[in-house]
Amino acid sequence: MSRNIRLLNATGLEKSSLESITVRVARALHCDVRLESYRPDLTRVLDPTRGQCHSGGLLKEMQDRFNGRGEPNERFAALVDVDLFIPVLTFVFGEAQLDGKYAVISTYRLKNEFYGIPADPGRLLERFEKEIVHEAGHVFGLLHCRNFECVMRSSTYVEEIDLKRNSLCSDCESIMERKME
Ligand SMILES: [Zn+2]
Ligand SMILES: [Zn+2]
């Protein structure tokens, strides 16, 4: 069974950066990755009191849009630049359906500027790439990993993202191989 995922540029993110991320995500997950654009109506998932977008609502939007389309086993990850939340948490970097089809990842809290420090576009791309690989890993059925450097380690702060690699550890690699058999 071949593994593939479509990265959906959902808020007009810069295309050349996403193209390089696409190549690197494909390498990290050994899968086919395609970059496409997607224009969801984010006002439908915006919580006006919190001023944030409900990530679960966006996953639902994607489901409505893509269910029954595309190739069988195709997965979708929306890339956005808006602040995301789930009701029980202040914010999330992203959310995925475990062993499912859809994920969403945002650059919003990956930017240095959010923390009042000077912008670092290279660092931002690295963080974004790791979080995309992480959420895609969940979509492919991987749980959080305790291995310190593994991309599937859970991160609450950007500093934790910076400490991990952009790749799966050997344990996660073999779980993923078994799932794909
Ligand atoms: Zn996770
Ligand atoms: Zn791991």
Image: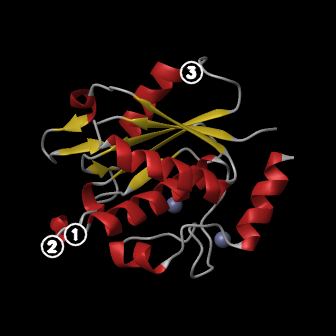
Q: Is residue 46 left or right of residue 75?
A: left
Q: CA distance from mark 2 to mark 3?
A: 41 Å
**Mark 2: which amino acid?**
Pro
Horizontal and vertical percent position of residue 60: 44, 30
Which residue bears the numbered disc 3? Answer: 67
Disc 3 crowd, CA 10 A, few/some/many (<14, 14-19, 20+): few
Regarding residue 157, the answer to whether it shows in the image is no
Mark 2–mark 1 distance (CA, rounded to whole Å): 6 Å
Q: In the image, which is nearer the foreground, mark 3 or mark 1?
A: 1
**Which residue position holds label 2?**
118
Q: Quadrant of ligand 2?
A: bottom right
Q: Nearer the viewer, residue 77 or 126?
A: 126
User: Which amino acid type is marked by label 1?
Assistant: Asn
Determine whether the residue tagged by mark 1 lies in a helix, strand or loop.
Answer: helix
Q: Nearer the viewer, mark 2 or mark 3?
A: 2
Residue 51 on image: x %, y % = 15, 45
Instruction: Find residue 168 and report its image quarter.
Output: bottom right
Residue 112: image tag: 1
| Circle 1 crowding by C-alpha within 10 Å: few under 14, some 14–19, many from 20 | some
Identify the amino acid type marked 3.
Asn
Whether the residue under disc 3 has CB within 8 Å of ligand 1 = no
Do the residues bearing badges 3 and 1 touch, measured as CB atoms within 8 Å?
no
